[in-house]
Amino acid sequence: MAANTTPAQTFPHDFIWGFATASFQIEGSTNVDGRGKSIWDDFSKIPGKTQDGKDGDVATDSYNRWKEDIELLAEYGVKSYRFSIAWSRIIPLGGRNDPVNQKGIEFYSKFIDALLAKGIIPFVTLYHWDLPQALHDRYGGWLNKEEIVKDYVNYAKICYESFGDRVKHWLTMNEPWCVSILGYGRGVFAPGRCSDRARSPEGDSSTEPYIVAHSVILAHAYAVKLYRDQFKSQQHGEIGITLNGDWAMPYDNSPENVAAAQRALDFAIGECIYADPVYLGHYPESMRMILGDRLPVFTPEELVVVKGSSDFYGMNTYTTNLCKAGGDDIFQGYVDYTFTRPDGTQLGNQAHSGWLQDYAPGFRSLLNYLYKRYKLPIYVTENGFSVKDESMKPMPHVLHDEERVHYFRGTTSSLRAAMFEDGVDVKAYFPWSLLDNFEWADGYITRFGLTYVDYDTQKRYPKDSAKFLTQVSYRSCPCRLALLIAVFL
Ligand code: PNW
């Protein structure tokens, strides 16, 4: 953000901003207080599944250090905190006829109370990839539409009943593209199924991702229907889904690469495999042409529930890809991605994650594209950068994360341009992540935190990026003061 603007002038008083995390990435304490296993518990312990061979048993120990985490959020002055609930803490075996775990409910309940006591708005994800293992074992989890939709809706119901008096912002699912394509297509995320027998003894990458995608959309849609039918009139909250999607630019002006960039948006990046059904009521034509009858069909009754099932456009975005027609990757709609321009230069700084470079103009373009296409307010629920080799940097040097500051200077400035110059209605912004944490298949090597975590001591140290975001942020917002007053009255 440019130094000469004050955020109070630029962001509306009701703009929500804060930092984000997810249960399995931070909580640890996987076998305490009645928690059941999730599909990531054992998967992360299989040799070769995480880069550093580490699992999520401890993570950032946030199940024990939750008070400290809330203190940190309060120090940062955030207005909101996005976190997720672990399904298997609430219902250890996951299913609609399985027992509910009161201790799990108590944990999140006291957590939500403590956030509110500090004037921090809870922004809650119901599903951030940690499916109860028991449901996977019992009937194949997301592969079994009939069962999983009912079980997910029952889990959502318990959450609305237990927390909905205080939680007014719900996200049903985080990045379903990752659930289906990375979990059942490429086999790199739990449960790790795919056609490659060197990687997985079971799975079919040509069909399962689409079956899973279909179940996830339906579970989301029926959970939203339940909220709207039975809870919204008393609880007055809002609910939606959050999708991942990165901006796609043609590699050059050739018609096939221009078409490839659109196909990437339609097909591979996750917007449309979910967004078109949810917001427009059908799958995109380019997907239908390539996938034919592999794409499951919604019944007319399902379609009524799916269409319009999100109150807002929830968006996680990290980077921009240059797109070339070709390649053999059906999950990207036969589009090749590169960060190298035709003249040999790079699009931006390379992150530690191979799939991520810093290119802020793409963020502005994506916001414009999504707003024009889906015509709903946008909630940016994730946006962040993993600094290259950050794990190897010594203290205190590691705290001066200039490249991450550069990234956020760019994205916050693009955000403001999209809002104030282009008229895009953006209502929330959540940088990822409050803490360095368990970065899925990367283990702990890749760090996205605004706060450095020393995993030997679990001590937290603010990085310069956290200071940047909190200084240039959305502080001194009158509604924060109003909220504080409301909570204490
Ligand atoms: C998101 N990709 O995941 C998740 O919502 C977070 O849990 C995660 O920590 C964060 O982004 C950083 O990775 C992604 O391969 C995982 O393009 C992989 C990809 C994108 C997002």
Image: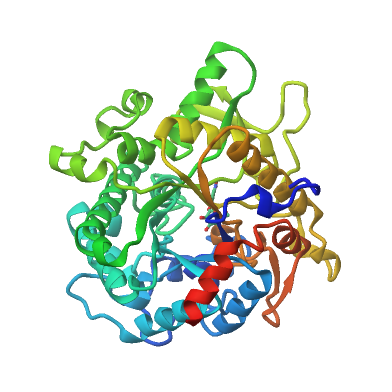
Whether residue 330 appears in this view of the structure is: no
Residue placed most toward the observer, 11 or 415:
11
Residue 430 vertical placement versus 177 (above, below): below
Residue visible at 55% across and 39% down in the picture: 246
Q: Quadrant of residue 19?
A: bottom right
Whether residue 432 appears in this view of the structure is: yes
Residue visible at 57% across and 83% down in the picture: 67
Q: Quadrant of residue 131?
A: bottom left
Residue placed most toward the observer, 224 or 58:
224
Left or right, 384 with respect to 104, comes to: right
Q: How many marks?
A: 0
- How is this picture coloured? rainbow
Where in the figure is residue 334, as x and y percent of width and height? 48, 27
Residue 9 vertical placement versus 226 (above, below): above
Where in the figure is residue 335, as x and y percent of width and height? 52, 27
Residue visible at 18% across and 43% down in the picture: 302
Where in the figure is residue 256, as x and y percent of width and height? 53, 15
Residue visible at 57% across and 79% down in the picture: 61
Residue placed most toward the observer, 447 or 379:
379
Residue 404 vertical placement versus 435 (above, below): above
Residue 408 vertical placement versus 268 (above, below): below
Where in the figure is residue 243, as x and y percent of width and height? 44, 47
